[in-house]
Image (cartoon, rainbow, N blue to C red):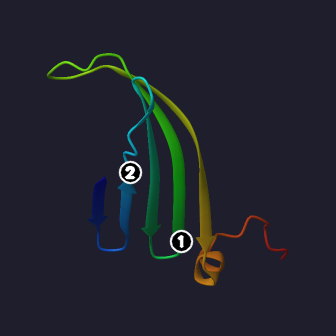
Amino acid sequence: MEVGAAALRTSSTGGVHFDLGEFSKDVRFRPTVELGVGDHVTLLTGAAEVHYVFSKGPGLAPIRRGGAGFTHAAFDDHARRLAPRTTPRSP
């Protein structure tokens, strides 16, 4: 498992990557969950990745990976009020 976090003045984010091990020869399953919170939006993302590891020797090993994920964004009402107008005002 890998855990990470970051924080700035107006936002913060954190996430977890799980290494659930091999489910087939040289193929690993690695789901991910991340949460980001900012001034006017909250993001929740998730992914299910599969990694194929080409070699198991010491040092770096090339991998091939693929997966699917989702992102959910929730905006608060304050962000909608600050959005610029897209239609001109009539005189």
Which quadrant, please, contains the C terminus?
bottom right
Compared across the picture, whether 14 is left or right of 35 comes to: left
Decide which of 57, 69 is in the foreground and name it.
57
User: In the image, what residue occupies the spot 36% across and 74% down?
Assistant: 10
Decide which of 4, 56 is in the foreground and name it.
56
Q: How many marks?
A: 2
User: In the image, what residue occupies the spot 35% across and 16% down?
Assistant: 54
User: Label 1, on which residue?
Assistant: 41
User: Label 2, on which residue?
Assistant: 18
| Picture coordinates of residue 75, whole percent (x, y) | 61, 73
| Picture coordinates of residue 58, whole percent (x, y) | 14, 21
* Three-letter code for the amino acid on which mark 1 is drawn: Val
Residue 30 falls in image quadrant? top left
Q: Is residue 34 above or below residue 22?
A: below
* Three-letter code for the amino acid on which mark 2 is drawn: Phe
Q: Secondary structure at mark 2?
A: loop
